[in-house]
Image: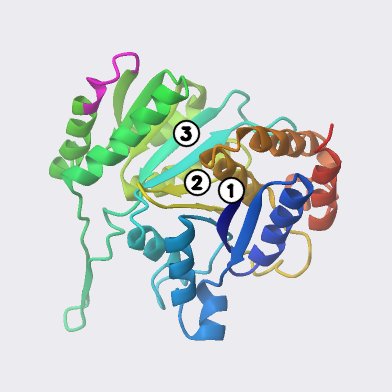
Amino acid sequence: MHKITLIPGDGIGLEIVESVKQIFAAAKVPIEWDEQLIGKTAFEKTGKLLPDELVNSIKTNKVALKGPAETPIGKGFQSVNVQLRQLFDLYANVRPCKNIKGVQTKFDNVDLVLFRENTEGLYSGISYYDERLEIADSISRVTKRGCERIVRAAFEYAHKNNRKKVTIIHKANILKHSGRLLLEAGENCKKDFPNLIVEDKIIDNMAMQLVRNPEYFDVMVTSNLFGDILSDLCAGLVGGLGVVSGANVGDEYAVFEAVHGTAPDIAGKGIANPTAVLRSAILMLEYLKENELAHKIDAALIKVLSVKENCTGDLGGKSNTAQFTENIIKNLGS
C-alpha cells in the first residue's frame, strides 16, 4: 500500500482529481490518499499558501499528486509550484509529449520527452525593483551542479528507456557563461553513454525546428525558462496542455501534476477534462513501479480518447467529466 499526498488544488482541480480517485479505486490501485490543501484554496482556509500540514505530508510520504494551483500574473504571491519545487529540490521537470490515437493534431509521429531544470535560472526568485528609478532586475542564477544533474537525469532516462538521442538546448552564443555550463555538462555526461547520439541547438532555432519537424527529436534537456516555454510548445504538438502529463522529480521526493491552469471559467460545471492529471497519475504509478496498473489505466484512457464523441468538449467530444471518467472505468477490464 502506497500512501500518497493528494493535492486537488484550485479551480477545476477538485473535479479532475476526483476523477483520478474514482478510476484508481475501480482499478484497485493499492493507494491510500492523504488529501491536503494548497494555493488560494489553502490561503482562504488556513491563511497560508503552503500549509505546514501539506509540507509535512510530502516530507512523510515522499510522493504527491497535484492538481492545478492558482498563480496571479504580475502581482500577488509567488507561484506555489515554484515554491514546492525549491522546497523539496525537485530539480527535474519531466514532460512527455506523445501523439494519442483519436486526438487530431498536425503531426502524427511525435514522441518527445523534455527535461527542464526546475529550481534555478530566472525562476530562482532573485529579483529587485528600484522604486525611484523604476527598474526591475530578475537574476538568472545557474550552477554547475544544477546543470550537471539535470543533464545526467536526461541521459539516464534516455538510456533506461531505449531512446536514441539527446538534444541539449541553450543560448550559449549570447548567454556565454550559463550556456557554457549546460554544454560542458553534456560533454562530460556523454562519455558515460556512448550509445546515445548527442547534439545541441540554440533555443530560437530549436523552437522553429520543433514546429517544422518534431518527429526528428527524442529526449531534450534545457534550462528552466527555455524549458517552461518549450514544454507548452511540445504540448501543442500533441493536442494541448489538457492531454499531457508532468512530473517534478528530485533525489528524495516527487510531485506529479497536471500542467494546465485552474480554468476558473468552467470550474464547478462538471465539464473539465481530467486527462492531464490522470496521465500524470499514470507517470506516478510507473515511478512507484506499479507498471502493470499504469499500463492498464493508460490503455483504458487511450480507448476512450480514440472515440471522439466520448471525449470532453475541449477535444471536440460530448462527454462531461463524470461520463468521461465512467467510460474509462468501463474499459479497465477490456
The local crowd at label 3, few if under 14, some if 14 to 19, many if 20 or more residues have their Cα within 10 Å, is: many
Residue at the spot x=75%, y=33% of the render? Answer: 102
Residue 191, magenta (yes or no): yes
Precedes in sequence: disc 1 or disc 3: 3
The residue lying furthest to the top in this view is 195
Precedes in sequence: disc 2 or disc 1: 2
Mark 1 vs 3: CB contact within 8 A: no
Q: Which residue is mark 2?
A: 232
Q: Main secondary structure of the magenta part?
A: loop
Q: Amino acid at mark 2?
A: Asp
The magenta segment: 189-196
Distance from disc 3 to disc 2, alpha carbons, whole Å, reads 12 Å
Q: Which residue is mark 1?
A: 241
Q: Amino acid at mark 1?
A: Leu
Image coordinates for residue 307, horizontal then vertical, percent: 83, 36
Residue at the spot x=67%, y=66% of the render? Answer: 14
Mark 2 vs 1: CB contact within 8 A: yes
The residue lying furthest to the left in this view is 177
Question: Splitting the image into 4 quarters, where does residue 175 fall?
Answer: top left
Residue 228 visible from this viewpoint: yes
Q: Amino acid at mark 3?
A: Val
Question: Splitting the image into 4 quarters, where does residue 172 fall?
Answer: top left
Q: Quadrant of the C terminus?
A: top right
Along the line of sight, which residue is nearer the eye, 76 or 40? Answer: 40
Image coordinates for residue 124, horizontal then vertical, percent: 27, 60
Q: Which residue is mark 3?
A: 113
